[in-house]
Image (spheres, rainbow, N blue to C red):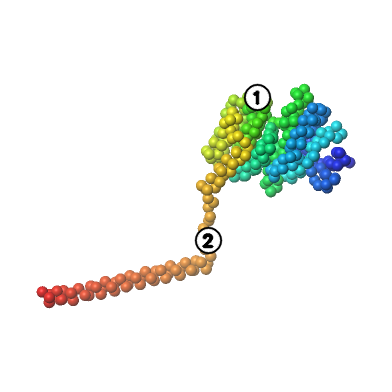
Amino acid sequence: MSEILNDRYRLDKPLGEGGMAIVYQASDLMLERTIAVKILREGFSTSLAFQERFKEEARAAANLTHPNIVTVHDFGFDNDQLFIVMEYVPGTDLKQIIGESGFLSVEHASHLFVQACAGIGYAHRAGLVHCDIKPHNMLITPDHRLKVTDFGIARALASVKHDEQSQAIWGSPAYFSPEQAAGRAPSPASDVYSLGVVFYEMLTGQLPFTDPSPQELALLHRYESPPLPREINPEISPELEEIILKVLSKEPNSRYRTADQLGRIVISFTETEETLSPPEIPAPTPDQGTLQTILDLEKKGAEKQWLTILLGLIALSAVGGLIPFWIWVYYQLN
């Protein structure tokens, strides 16, 4: 028998799990619709401080209504489990798509990335910072719409004391901004850096920094320069590489300020690329009737050309025949 939370949400089947939660496809028995339910692991659910912070963040996330953000419908606590009810998004996540493709074309990556910037930029305008941007939190629908999920959960987890976090790790150090890696408070510019890491991975199939140790990985984000994207994928233009490297600047003030601004820059880049490289339109292949028309026109043109030559010769002969007459007139007058 399927578990039912709060006498309303029936858990139908698991969709995936991570270090902090398990996600289920579920049914809202009251509204009769398919939903997704994320149940946090026991280590988080038992913390009263985290429960309160989680409710605050869930309320804030529920106010975000945007086509590129997964909608939060409800949250609750039942059977000693803290859960959040969200819009069900069919499809897969961006991390899986990158893994299957190796890397995405510039056109495909830009199309998806601009959508991510639109959703996160909307949250920035609402005063929310995601804090845990990574391709695992970007869902792609069958019609290629990108939706960002897990707003607020990372911020709630960050508020938990270390001795209350059990053994779970919130977020992923592979996508942390340098200031997050240093333990400082994140800002919209921190989300912009994490977006830059995602864009880098989309276009190259690799992360800018890798290390099995989270501590060493944090140091790489803080102090090391990433490998140049064009050395990995020559299809990346110098202009696009410049955008990526600016986003991955160590200092927040050196990046684009918000995800909205970054999205506009990428849109401007793609429009410029399309203008400079218009699509080639192949010449139509003439059919048999068209070929006959062309031959007829060429034949008529040749006939006109010979007629012109003949008329010219006649005119020349006529002029030449008058020369003796004018000589005779000249002698008569003199």
- Mark 2 and 1 residues: CB-CB less than 8 Å, in contact? no
| Secondary structure of the residue carrying numbered label 1 | loop
Q: Amino acid at mark 2?
A: Thr
Instruction: Decide: few, some or many residues near mark 1? Use Cα within 10 Å; few <14, some 14-19, many ≥20.
Output: few
Q: Nearer the viewer, mark 2 or mark 1?
A: 1
In the rendered image, which quarter contains the C terminus? bottom left
Rendered image quadrant of residue 152:
top right
Q: How many marks?
A: 2
Q: Nearer the viewer, residue 75 or 21?
A: 75
Rendered image quadrant of residue 316:
bottom left
Instruction: Give the x, y percent position of residue 243.
Output: 56, 37
Residue at the image point whose x is 68% and y is 46% from the top: 145
Q: Amino acid at mark 1?
A: Ala
Instruction: Give the x, y percent position of residue 167.
Output: 77, 26
Residue 182, numbered circle:
1
Give above or below for 304 relative to 134. Answer: below
Left or right: residue 301 versus residue 329 is: right
For residue 159, say whether it is visible. Answer: yes
Location of mark 2 (residue) = 285
Left or right: residue 228 versus residue 119 is: left
